[in-house]
DNA sequence: ATATGGTTTAACCAAATGGTTAATAACTTT
DNA sequence: AAAGTTATTAACCATTTGGTTAAACCATAT
């Protein structure tokens, strides 16, 4: 079978490209380095992905499609707000430990080229806040949680969960933490963050 | 006076370099573009700053020295925790509206080269959490605020304030906001964020 | 006015970089 | 096994890029 080799090479390229793009960014990445990491000739990159931009987009879409379902867990799940926050916080931190470069990569590249997100919006799995909005307004009306807009709550949830990984070097410096200490801080946040949010919004 | 011209050129270079480095990053920045923006010959960049790396470091240190005092307002001010949070949140958001590229620039470049922060630590104004730690432990002991570690509280304060600007393109996409709507969200956060934090930690 | 010293420029350079090409290798189909 | 097709490579190319150099410029001191 011919396909085996093809897909293998194509996949190896994507893995290598992910590696390089996510650590160095579009501008810092070198096609030669990607080729070396994939163990192939530089011309192969163009054979399969035509040019740097398209290879980058393949990597970016791939990364984004990993992150999106995580956020959808907050926006479109059927459980209560309190449960969502608890689950998301724990799950997200576990998730990000496995993909440490991911949030930073996405944020960095979107800031470099904000229009890029338009290409992502086509995807039906693109996170949408509408359902969450209804739920928040509902729970506020019922008095389950204190008045807050869905947008602000969602921003807060994202901020508290994502920021500590994006700003890792800053946090390590300010708290004089080594890698082990930093990991412990993040581990603690799996419950700490959910409590922090729920404390703030729950009516008692 | 000869000096007038010197300092003027040197300053113009720094302004142009800030402009380009903060929007494109170290890797995306081009010396030619900086020279053009400064209205001078490319050789002048090397005459005053020797090479790209040193010019970049001048810009980075400059940016960092703007951010540091903001964070020190939380860490080293003498007011109560509640007051600090209220003041910081409002001040920081006002500050960042004036320097929109700053937090993203610092975070992006520190992730590209984490060792870089070591050079910043020499500065005596480098944010240090020790005093804040004592204060938090004290207010927790007195029962003014609920039990929380100073590190986690500081991370939360930073996250809630800084993240929304770093992740602007994501937030705009998820909330389907245009620029005006986004600005309004940030404006609301000047009080919203402080309330959110205080709600969560204050003993009642 | 002229010598002096820092400032500025145009022209240049070597290395790096994304991309192409033409030939070869390997596999499939007939 | 011959023909056809896809995969892979080495060599090459044009452009970009950070950096250099030697000469010109200009303000000031003598």
Image (tube, coloured by chain):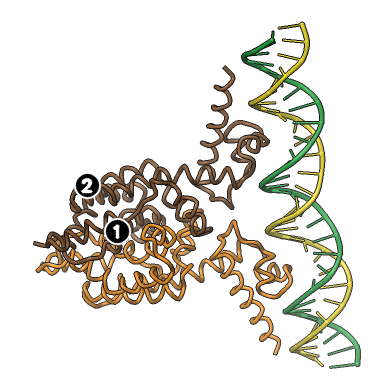
Chain colours: A orange, B brown, C yellow, D green
Q: Position of residue B128 (x, y in %)?
A: 35, 53
The residue that label 2 is drawn on is: B78
Specify whether residue B5 is in view. yes
Label 2 environment density (alpha carbons within 10 Å; few <14, some 14–19, many ≥20)? few
Q: Position of residue C23 (x, y in %)?
A: 89, 72
Label 1 environment density (alpha carbons within 10 Å; few <14, some 14–19, many ≥20)? many
Res. A2 mark: none
- B13 vs B192, left or right, is right
Q: How many marks?
A: 2
Q: Position of residue A46 (x, y in %)?
A: 69, 67
The chain under label 1 reads B
Q: Quadrant of residue A69?
A: bottom left
Look at the image and tell me in which quarter the C terminus of chain A lies.
bottom left
Report the Cα–Cα distance between label 2 and label 1: 16 Å
The chain under label 2 reads B
D23 relative to C14, above or below: above
Q: Residue at x 61, y 36 (%)?
A: B35
The residue that label 1 is drawn on is: B154
Residues marked 2 and 1, same chain: yes
A102 relative to D3, above or below: above
Q: Quadrant of residue B41?
A: top right
- B144 vs A184, left or right, is left
Q: Secondary structure at mark 1?
A: helix
B107 relative to A73, above or below: above
Q: Residue at x 22, y 59 (%)?
A: B136
């Amino acid at each position: 079978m011919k396909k085996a080799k093809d897909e293998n090479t194509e996949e190896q390229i994507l893995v290598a490209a992910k590696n390089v793009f996510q650590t160095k960014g579009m501008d810092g990445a070198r096609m030669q380095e990607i080729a070396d990491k994939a163990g192939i000739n530089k011309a192969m990159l163009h054979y399969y992905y035509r040019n740097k931009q398209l290879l980058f987009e393949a990597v970016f879409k791939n990364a984004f499609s990993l992150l999106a379902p995580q956020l959808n867990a907050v926006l479109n799940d059927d459980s209560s707000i309190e449960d969502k926050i608890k689950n998301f916080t724990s799950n997200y931190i576990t998730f990000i430990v496995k993909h440490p470069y991911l949030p930073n990569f996405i944020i960095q590249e979107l800031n470099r080229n904000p229009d890029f997100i338009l290409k992502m919006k086509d995807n039906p799995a693109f996170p949408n806040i509408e359902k969450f909005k209804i739920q928040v307004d509902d729970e506020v009306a019922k008095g389950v949680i204190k008045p807050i807009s869905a947008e602000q709550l969602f921003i807060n949830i994202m901020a508290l969960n994502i920021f500590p990984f994006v700003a890792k070097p800053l946090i390590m410096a300010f708290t004089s933490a080594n890698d082990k200490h930093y990991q412990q801080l993040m581990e603690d946040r799996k419950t700490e963050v959910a409590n922090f949010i729920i404390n703030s919004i729950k009516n008692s």
